[in-house]
Amino acid sequence: MIIKSYELDKNINSKIFLFHGINEGQKEEIIEKKFKPLFGENLFKYLENEIFSDIDNFYNQVLSKSFFEKNKLIIIKDASDKIKNEIEILKEKNLDDIKIILISNILDKKSKLRNLFEKEKDLVSIAFYSDNTQTLSAITKTFFSKKNIPISQESINLIVSRANGDRKSLNNELSKIENFLTNKKKITIEEIYILTNLSENYSINELVDNCLAKNKDKILYIINENNFSFEDTIIIIRTFLIKAKRLIKLNQNMRINKSIDQAILNFKPPIFWKDKELVKKQIKIWTLDKTYKLIDEINKIELNIKKNSINSLKILFDFILATSKTNN
């Protein structure tokens, strides 16, 4: 059946869900707020291609029960029509203590998987469309309101404009601001401009892009030419996160467009023409599986940097040099 995202509470007892569409940020928010609190540590993530590499093991892990895993949340990323038959099998199983969420990008109306979820009353299909400026402004205003930090409409407009109409990008911008706001009770528009100015911070973008393209000589040159500070380490690691997530979207787009050039051409927000060759190289290096592992590593490095501010630059540069090795 088809429902809207705001109707999810009424259907939360359903067992299998399909989240499809381009709004990755909203999908992540709903999983974080609505599902994770119900399952705690019993969360299992799969890529669709991982499932088919060992289908028997997948069924065993999903359907087996133990004393320590009374409830399970199964998240399957990059779901496509290929997994339709498995969903038809699973919906007939006893899933009392299990919820399954399939996450897809854009599925057209001819999609067999989408049609299955929309027609079956015991399956739930939710489409996630792009946010408009009003929605993103409301999210930003709520963010500051919860922290009791005054914010002007001009500042809100600036933050929203940096997000390029994408909730995931907005959450990244707000996360950078949250890191900056530690022990602070106010923020100026000038500070917001600097914090959200990654697209114009050429050295940081160039450093991260060349690291992901494994151009080690260029990386060493950039590090030697710039006097990076502790504040920069947070911005750099956040830039890694943003660009790693961009790689995931690009890889997903490749599955639809069947070519690197077309995936880059259709990407939103647009990739600057001078960066296209570098991004092509990144796509060839970073598979979806490798990129998800990279994101996990980025999150660990960020926590380590925050705990060890004195050694933050060493921690970051060790990570950059390790990531840029050609045999990784």
Image (spheres, rainbow, N blue to C red):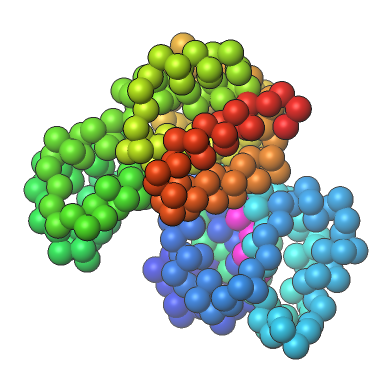
How many marks can you see? 0
- Residue 105 in percent (x, y) is at 57, 46
Residue sitting at x 63%, y 32%: 323
Identify which residue, 15 or 162, lies in the foreground: 162
Q: Which residues are magenta?
A: 100-104
Identify the residue at the far front of this view: 310
User: Magenta-highlighted stretch: main secondary structure?
Assistant: strand
Identify which residue, 178 or 141, lies in the foreground: 178
101 drawn magenta: yes
Please indicate whether residue 304 sits to the left or right of residue 282 in the image. left
Residue sitting at x 58%, y 77%: 39
181 drawn magenta: no
Taking 5 as reference, is 228 above or below it? above
Taking 228 as reference, is 119 above or below it? below
Taking 281 as reference, is 35 above or below it? below
- Residue 175 in percent (x, y) is at 35, 50
Where the N terminus falls, by quadrant? bottom right
Residue sitting at x 64%, y 32%: 322
- Whether residue 235 is visible: no
Taking 111 as reference, is 225 above or below it? above
Residue sitting at x 68%, y 26%: 325
Please indicate whether residue 9 sits to the left or right of residue 134 in the image. right
- Residue 25 in percent (x, y) is at 44, 51
User: Image quadrant of residue 95?
Assistant: bottom right
User: Image quadrant of residue 257?
Assistant: top right
- Whether residue 75 is visible: yes
User: Image quadrant of residue 138?
Assistant: bottom left
Identify which residue, 85 or 37, lies in the foreground: 37
Where the C terminus falls, by quadrant? top right
- Residue 195 in percent (x, y) is at 27, 37
